[in-house]
Image (cartoon, grey):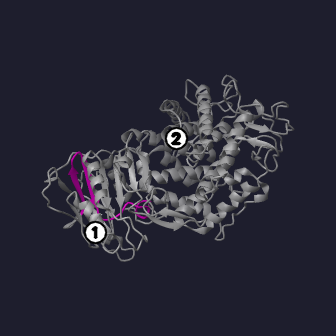
Amino acid sequence: MINLASPAQVGHGDEVSKPFSELMVNTAMSLWKDSLTMDASKPAKWTYDQGVVLKGVEGVWNKTGDGKYFKYIQQSMDFFVDKDGNIRTYKQDEFNIDNVNNGRILLLLYKVTGNEKYWKAATLLRDQLRKQPRTSEGGFWHKKIYPYQMWLDGLYMGEPFYAEYAAYAHDDTAFNDIARQFILMEKHSRDVKTGLLYHAWDESKQQKWADPVTGRSPNFWGRAMGWFGMALVDVLDYFPANHPQRKELLSILNRYAVAIAKSQDVKTGLWWDVLNLPNYKKNYLEASASSMFVYALAKSVRMGYLPASRLAVATKGYDGIVKKFLSVDAGAQVNLEGTVSVSGLGGNPYRDGSFDYYMSEKVVQNDPKGMGAFIQAANEMEMAATQKIGKGKTVMLDNYFNNEWKKDATGVEVPFHYTWSDKANSGFSMFGNVFDIYGVKKNTLTAAPTKENLKNANIYIIVDPDTEKETAKPNYIQQNDINVIADWVKNGGVLLLMGNDSGNAEFQHFNQLAGKFGIHFDEVSKNRVQGNDYKQGAIIIPAANYIFRSARKIYIKELSTVSQINIPMVGLKDSWQIDLKNGTDNIIMTVSYGRGRVIAVGDPWLYNEYLDGRKLPMEYENYKAGTDLVRWLIKPFAFRKK
């Protein structure tokens, strides 16, 4: 018997099974150890299916910090991408938009590792989109062999990658083109009566499956609608907030959500393979479409694209998937039943888009498209269960006192080092993922703190302010900054100060801020580690620790200790608490100040290098400790005296 476990349960001492997202990823990693092929007698081929699965794996990695998931993603792409960025079996001149989807994984690998081969490979796919044949209005053909045709499937295959690449490459004009694809697809395929979208549209109206007047295919295929919805919510992640067409994309999404809710099966919460014909004898409830709808709706609610009421539709759908489509075999492997293997239009033999055609395709177990969609849906629903913990809270990350820049792949100077967006070793993206899990809104402060720009922040993080070695003209903490921050804490703010060791940190001004709360960062370098002798940086957390309730062994190297300054100040006396020691060294200290809290640690130890599982041995629980800390920052527990 499988028990659904949310991320809130896992890792906090409960004896429960792993979440369904992890169980299904484990199945995928068992079925496709090196590369994805459905037929062992045939060589592996660059295929969009793999990208769908790997996006699910990426989500599980983000939620767990377990490096085995990233390793699997990387080895899966390395099977195809050589050292020069060429992609094995990929042929650009086929102009098959399906082949673009995996570019999202290439971008992830480049952002995390910095290996140029992934950027070069992704750029090949971006170049395909530049040359992709188009309809007269500018819509991408689905494939060169399918002239003048736009398919719903193609929106997922091309647009999320296109948007992510454009955002990274600072190609703002590309978003006009990206919006155009969704607007044209809805314009030509939407049925006014039901709100559903037909599978495809042929501008030439020459295909036998195309209506001679509208050019539309005959039916509403579930997975095609699923692809469209997933594409739209994933594109919105990168679509500029001030873009004039963002509002139109959100309107399309809202119309889409209404149609999906209306076509949901009342009894099971699932969706039919052909969406509008539930009473047709051969029709069946289908797993991949149902998973895609759940993902699109749940993520849209989490991101604020749709009203919270839409989560009820996703929840009912997810419960239906678990009940009907999940099975466990004799080896305790979790499997996904009920996915149609493929459905298309045209080709040879010819697929006419009729109801009977859709019913003729095989329904299989553990199809990668269905599994990938389910993993992504499960990731979202598991996050939905924990959103209320930090709902309404905002965390502000300083990018003013810490303000380092580097050139990206396009040669443009961009901020990095302890930023939410930096996915490399130096970034805070994995720490940011923990805030995402608990529903905390993330913001970045690029200016000096003021009463106005801090008023909506509940948590404020200042990390390793710059020295002249790091930034030509550092923004040192000034007395006015200290006064503003102290007033903010006094009124209930939670301040996290993360220093660094002697030789790698600015102490004078940072200690003036810390000293306001009776804290001092000592100019020392403790826990120095030689090479990969990790035990030199090991710190054991006592079981009774009230901040770190689940983590027991962490790794912090080359840190400054913290000490208490006895200053006579009303409201501060006897408000210190040493939260973590290593021998006689004070590692973490907390201070109660007015209605707020200040927590100080002498290292930015929660950056990606020590949180994402790619470097540290598994015995070190930095990700788990980061999760514990975030939960404490959201709602600091009652202060405990010695």
Asked which quadrant contains residue 107, the reply is bottom right
Q: Position of residue 108 (x, y in %)?
A: 56, 58
Residue 341 or 444: which is nearer the viewer?
Answer: 444
- Which residue is labeled 2 in the image? 299
Assign the C terminus to one quadrant of the image: bottom left
Residue 600 is covered by the magenta coloring = yes
Residue 303 or 265: which is nearer the viewer?
Answer: 303
Label 2 neighbour load within 10 Å: few <14, some 14-19, many 20+: many
Of labels 1 and 2, the one closer to you: 1
Three-letter amino acid code at the position of disc 2: Lys
Answer above or below: position of 303 versus 502.
above
Answer above or below: position of 173 versus 456.
below
Report if the CB atoms under discs 1 and 2 are less than 8 Å apart.
no
Task: Examine the rendering and report whether any part of residue 403 can be seen.
Answer: yes
**Residue at horizontal 53%, vertical 53%?**
58
Residue lying furthest front in this view? 480
Q: Where is residue 307 in the image (x, y as percent from the top left)?
A: 50, 32
Q: Is residue 338 left or right of residue 92?
A: left
Three-letter amino acid code at the position of disc 1: Gln
Mark 2 or mark 1, which is nearer the start of the sequence? 2
**Residue at horizontal 64%, vertical 41%?**
227
Identify the element where label 2 is drawn.
helix
Assign the N terminus to one quadrant of the image: top left
Label 1 neighbour load within 10 Å: few <14, some 14-19, many 20+: few
- Which residue is labeled 1 in the image? 508
Identify the element where label 1 is drawn.
helix
Q: Give the range drawn in magenta.
A: 587-612
**Residue at horizontal 35%, vertical 58%?**
462
Q: How far apart are marks 1 and 2 (CA)?
A: 44 Å
